[in-house]
Image: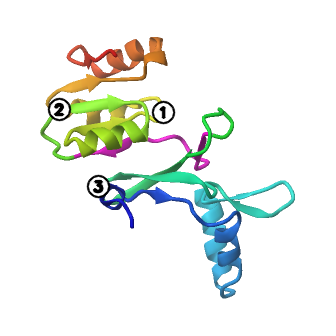
Amino acid sequence: ETDPSALRLRSGHASLSADTSALRLRSGHASLSASLALACKVGLLTRRDDGSLVDTIPAGYLIYTHHLDETVTYLSGRATFSDEQDKKARNLKAPKRLYWALQDHDTPLLVVEGQACAITAWQWNYNSVALCGAYLNEQDAKSIQAHSAIYLALDTDAGERIEQVANELGPLTMILSG
């Protein structure tokens, strides 16, 4: 059974075996060649050096759908089996995007680092946004500043990034330290 939070936030788990998505696309109708090309173009599939196609976010990863309103803007994957730098994340081949988990736009916003923290805050009925390693652009900063209050709660190893993000968000940003 799928967790209700995962359903509401449109996230899930990559549970297919390796290469299954690419194989499913290839085994269908001839008209699916366009779908295969589109899947590569948007980054769902990655072409290896030998020409074979593989899922960009393989089996064993949590899949987070980044969306703005009802539009999916990005997909990211996080390993459930490793924190090693080269294995822990799999993202689309596109600029990283923020991960929004909103309850009500007119309430305070908690700015965190990762999607799991944003989902936890959302489950506790807080608005949250995860930076996900992305740097804030002007539109991101404006969207965050639209909230009634901003609380910045980055990981303890964030160092200078805390001050950098706080400066980008403005003088009323409150920094929470743990």
- Please say whether residue 99 is one of the residues in the magenta stretch: yes
Q: Is residue 56 above or below residue 104?
A: below
Q: Residues within 10 Å of mark 1 (few under 14, many from 20)?
A: few
The x, y position of residue 120, in whole percent, is 32, 40
Side (left or right) of 152 relative to 93:
left
Residue 167, by quadrant, is: top left
Labelled pair 1, 3 in contact (Cβ < 8 Å): no
Residue 14, by quadrant, is: bottom right
Q: Earlier in the sequence, mark 2 or mark 1?
A: 2
CA gap between label 2 and label 1 equals 21 Å
Q: Earlier in the sequence, mark 1 or mark 3?
A: 3
Residue linked to disc 3: 69
Q: Is residue 23 above or below residue 157?
A: below
The x, y position of residue 90, in whole percent, is 60, 46
Residue range highlighted in magenta: 88-102
Closer to the camera in the image, 138 or 108 = 108
Quarter of the image that includes the C terminus:
top left
Residue linked to disc 1: 134
Badge 3 amino acid = Asp
Side (left or right) of 171 relative to 60:
left
Residue 85, by quadrant, is: top right
What's the residue at 65%, 76% (across, down)? Answer: 25
Residue linked to disc 2: 108
The x, y position of residue 45, in whole percent, is 66, 61
CA gap between label 1 and label 3 equals 19 Å
Q: Is residue 96 above or below residue 161?
A: below
What's the residue at 47%, 12% (across, down)? Answer: 159
